[in-house]
Image: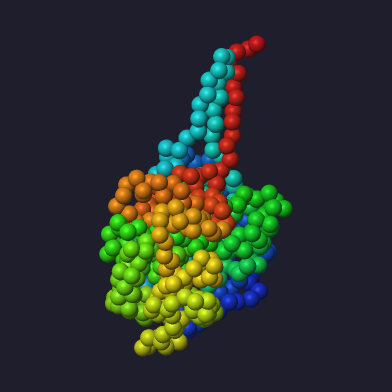
Amino acid sequence: MTVIKSYYGGTYRDGAEKRFAKTYPATGEVIAEVELATKEMLDEAVAMAHEAQKPWAKRSVQDRGQVLIKCAHALREANDELSRLEVQDVGKVFAEAVSADVPSGPDVLEYMGAAIMTYHGTQHQWPGAIGYTRRIPLGVCAGIGAWNYPVQIALWKSSPALAMGNAFILKPSEMTPLSALKIVEVMEDAGLPKGLLNVMQGDYTMGSAICSHPDIAKVSLTGGVETGKKIMMQSAESLKRVTLELGGKAPLILFDDCDLDKAAATAMEANFYTAGEVCSNATRVFVHRPIADEIISRMKTMTDAMTVGDPMADDVQMGALISEQHLQKVLNYVDQGVAEGAELVTGGERVHPQGFENGYFMRPTILSQCNDDMAVVCEEIFGPVMSVLIFDDEDEAVERANATHFGLGAGLFTRDLTRAHRVADALEAGNVWINTYNLIPPDMPFGGVKQSGFGRESSHYAFEAYSDVRATYIALDDE
């Protein structure tokens, strides 16, 4: 049985007190055991990270940037292997992992390496004096990752921290521990100094230890709202900086002048990609009444044509959910939606693909006749369940779309340019997509408002979360 260990200070570490069984979601088989690190191991890792960070911070931004760009190129060369690990970790289809999910990590790393070379402060001038500001690293930062995008999240969080001159400690989800270790291995082989990027395997107890550790300056979480609240409370004692990328219940508004084929296909993608286990997915699809029947019919046809099964197969469009427990949670939401009056258009049941009978699979699901008070509409399901809601005019659509405590993503489809800008400006979300969905280039920020969190991943905005601003004032006269 493969044993997954923590890695810090440039080597794998023993000393864990207990183990966690890692299963492959597509088969339900235990494929590894994860050694959960102790608080004493975290203390040791933080001390080593501090020592590695000091010389790294002194290197020029050009030097640091070049190292990270080399690391990004090396990770791209390892894309196939990382993608296979991501499939074993998450159960998503290989085609998604290899073409988009895994490459998005090195893309951000390369961007951060290039951007830090031109990132600069401000200059000021007064009679007899000048001043300037510069960004300085925080020291040791940490990231607590979710299980749906382990490669992307690891690099989205560590890349700006490393570029800014920090060391980084990553705690991946105990359910997806495989790819983080490969990332560190590849990056150190490509020239990243040992001790700068470290992996602490653990469950929520390690997350709590990271948040309460006095020598970790900042923590970034991707996770649920309730977890985010706990992270804030646990980080308060040391006044730790916190970035939270939390849950979502994003609206997608389809106006009657939209391209019906593109809108229907995008709504499908925005719900069933990675088996719906995406925080920004548009799980509330608001459809203009004149096109509602046609849109629902097209989506049903496309959904019924989807193949669910072996994530490594070329002809499969949706893989497994992360665990048996999570699968049952999602199925229960479907049952609850029907009990509350929603119409089951298609899907909603567990499936047992041949050869993968014990995996955590279900049919992608569309619920129509939904109203805004249903649990399936109000609560984040994090599974392949689309709720369709009908609206009559623009103001109604915007008001209902914003009637949620979430605010991560939102989208709309229309050919009307003025409506597109007007509605996008009115939607309460950190990211808005028009006539597309869930595209996040590395130079665009990603993050939420309201209870979807605060702070931004990707883009130059991410540098702000991993640095302080120092202002220096210089008197030029002797009086």
Q: Nearer the viewer, residue 439 or 98?
A: 439
Q: Residue at x 58, y 77 (%)?
A: 20
Please name whichever residue, 61 or 148, is drawn nearer the observer in this view of the structure: 148
Is residue 436 shown above or below 358? above
The percent position of residue 73, horizontal first and vertical second, equals: 35, 55
Can you say whether 27 is above or below 188 in the image?
A: below
Q: Is residue 120 above or below residue 342?
A: above
**The quarter of the displayed image where residue 224 is located:** bottom right
Q: Residue at x 65, y 56 (%)?
A: 232
Image spot of residue 342 (x, y percent): 47, 75
Q: Dividing the picture into quarters, in which one does residue 266 lie?
A: bottom left
Residue drawn at (33%, 75%) of the image: 300
- Answer with the quarter of the image where residue 16 lies: bottom right
Frontmost residue, 464 versus 177: 464
Answer left or right for 343 relative to 10. Answer: left
Q: Is residue 289 above or below residue 458?
A: below
* Residue 154 can be seen, yes or no: no
Q: Is residue 464 visible?
A: yes
Q: Which x, y percent locates residue 239?
A: 68, 49
Which residue lies most toward the top here? 479
Q: Residue at x 41, y 85 (%)?
A: 351
Answer left or right for 38 relative to 183: right
Residue 212 location in percent, x, y? 69, 57
Specify the quadrant that holds the C terminus. top right
> In this figure, what is the number of numbered marks?
0
Colouring of the image: rainbow
